[in-house]
Amino acid sequence: MKCPFCRADNDRVIDSRASEDGLAIRRRRECQGCGRRYTTYERVEGVSVKIVKKDGARVPFERDRIKRGLEKACWKRPVSDAQIEAIVSAVEEEIYNQYDTEIESGFVGELVMRHLRLLDQVAYVRFASVYREFKDARDFVDELQPMLDEARARPIKGQAELTFQEEP
């Protein structure tokens, strides 16, 4: 493994452990050339799942594309890298468990949005606006309406429900 800092091809593994719910091995390495440390991940090279895009083109599934999209949607939001990685891993696991060779890009986007909606509603709307190609403000309102309806249906945490009784 070449060091990402000095490009030397001489390192040693300091620590190895299971990662991403056992789907990967995380290795902490130390470069023997410059002494800096870095992390690598080892994953099983499985069957390549193809994503069928809207125009019919087929491209290989890339977890990094999902991660980049989530990072953009979560920019300046209180969402950690670990939470983003958890969503990417959950989506990837679901794809590989349910599909053998191909999956529609629309389904992948819906999977990501389902997880993101539970994590951060602002990031969810950001992701949805790009994914669903919002054209105007009405598209935003249509996407937000179900969330607003849910919020109205449940009381706000820490706020007691007020009841009034009429005096006789």
Image (spheres, grey):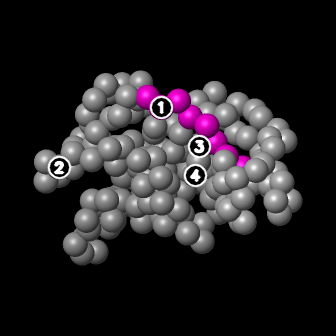
Q: Are marks 2 and 1 in contact (CB under 8 Å)?
A: no
Q: Which residue is mark 1?
A: 45
Comparing labels 2 and 1, the label whose residue is closer to the camera: 1
Identify residue type, mark 1: Glu
Identify residue type, mark 2: Ala
Identify residue type, mark 3: Ala
How crowded pointer 1 is (Cα within 10 Å; few <14, some 14-19, many 20+) is rated as few
Residue 57, disc: 2
Q: As drawn, is 95 to the left or to the right of 22?
A: left
Instruction: Kindly tell me whether residue 132 is visible in this rendering.
Output: yes
Q: Residue at x 58, y 30 (%)?
A: 23
Q: CA distance from mark 1 to mark 4?
A: 22 Å
Q: Are marks 4 and 3 in contact (CB under 8 Å)?
A: yes
Q: Please say if 25 is above or below 129.
A: above
Find residue 61 and report its image quarter. top left
Query: Which of these two is toward me, 147 or 134?
Result: 134
Q: Which residue is mark 3?
A: 86
State whether the magenta stretch is mostly helix, strand or loop. strand
Find residue 167 and report its image quarter. bottom right
Q: Secondary structure at mark 3?
A: helix
Q: As drawn, is 104 to the left or to the right of 160?
A: left
**Residue ranking furthest to the left:** 55
Q: As drawn, is 73 to the left or to the right of 1?
A: left
Q: Residue at x 22, y 72 (%)?
A: 135
Q: Which residue is mark 4?
A: 84
Q: Are marks 1 and 3 in contact (CB under 8 Å)?
A: no
Q: Position of residue 94 (x, y in %)?
A: 43, 31
**Residue ranking furthest to the bottom:** 136
Comparing labels 1 and 4, the label whose residue is closer to the camera: 1
